[in-house]
Amino acid sequence: MELSPREKVLLIATHLAVGSSDASHLCTFCGGGEHKDKGFSVTRVDKIQVAYKCHRDKCGKSGYVFLNGGGGEETVVPSFQPCPYRGMTSNFEYDDLVYLDNKYGLNLDYVIKAGWVKAQQPSGSFNIVMPVWGPTGKLRGHVVRRVLDHDKKEVRTYKIEPEPWLCWYRTSGADIVVVEDQISALKAAAFTTSVALLGTHLSLEKLTEIQIASKGNIYLAFDKDASKSSIEYFQKYRAICPNLYVILLQKDLKNMDYGDIMKLGEPFINVRDVPRITDKANSGTA
């Protein structure tokens, strides 16, 4: 017999520690829609209570269930409770930084300024702990993400503030590039101000925060598999946000080198001088 959506929520929650979230699953109600978007978050509120939320506009199911029974669809999610990250961390070793550089084209200066550190995990796993920053530099929580090629993709969230779940990397750029994840945002920060949605859900609350901070244009640069979502948001919000634009990517931003990113045009015209980790290694200055 197939599990019910509620039972699937509980199954996802079995591996979560109290206070932690996992947002890397297909919605147990809508299945992720036509494009199989993995935007379904499950939070272990306490020992018996589990909250869930689908971040697809066309679904939006939310509520909570109990491990001992009860709860149900469309029930009200409990009021916000801080869920700080309490895991042990350490600074990246040089080989870790070189790996991030080789895989994503990241650079030492930006990784350090973003406050990223390494989670102390069993041997063979590589999890990075990334602070989530507000537009004024206020810490909103953390995201823990696996990055090794052979690791199953896993993203966990730890919120400490009831503010919009966005991560800002502020520069002097007037334009704002809106991407899905923090790795893409850090790449975009080499050109202008960037913000990570930490998913593909762009609510009016999130857009309002972005509009307030904007001094130029706002560009949606979602991953290739979410191009349809970015176009839908453009159509939905264009009337209230006339400086909103869409950049359709043939390759995810986090997987592009700086030269290819510059070919996209505005707002990626002027790249800052951000030395690559491997450049330092080759010059003997690392």
Image (tube, helix red, strand yellow):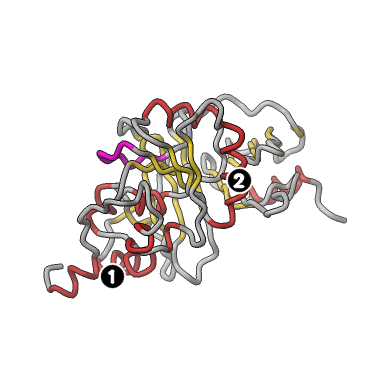
Q: Determine the residue positioned at 62% across, 51% down.
A: 38
Q: Determine the residue positioned at 43% across, 33% down.
A: 160
Q: Quadrant of the C terminus?
A: bottom left
Q: Quadrant of the N terminus?
A: bottom right
On residue 229, the disc is 2
- State yes or no: residue 206 in magenta: no
Classify mark 1: helix, strand or loop.
Answer: helix
Q: Residue 88: image x %, image y %?
A: 36, 51
- The local crowd at label 1, few if under 14, some if 14 to 19, many if 20 or more residues have their Cα within 10 Å, is few
Classify mark 2: helix, strand or loop.
Answer: helix
- Kindly report the secondary structure that dominates the magenta region of the rendered protein: loop
Query: Is residue 69 toward the left or the right of residue 121 in the image?
Result: right
Q: CA distance from mark 1 to mark 2?
A: 36 Å
- The local crowd at label 2, few if under 14, some if 14 to 19, many if 20 or more residues have their Cα within 10 Å, is many
Looking at the rendered structure, the number of numbered marks drawn on it comes to 2
Q: Are marks 1 and 2 in contact (CB under 8 Å)?
A: no
**Viewer-proximal residue among 72 and 175:** 175
Which stretch appears magenta? 167-174
Query: Is residue 21 toward the left or the right of residue 8 in the image?
Result: left
Q: Determine the residue positioned at 43% across, 31% down.
A: 210
Q: Residue 250: image x %, image y %?
A: 51, 61
Quadrant of residue 232 within the rendered picture: top right
The residue positioned farthest toward the right in the image shown: 1
Amino acid type at mark 2: Ser
Q: Residue 105: image x %, image y %?
A: 33, 64
Answer above or below: position of 273 versus 216. Answer: below
> Which callout, 1 or 2, points at the residue further toward the start of the chain?
1
**Viewer-proximal residue among 221 and 145:** 221
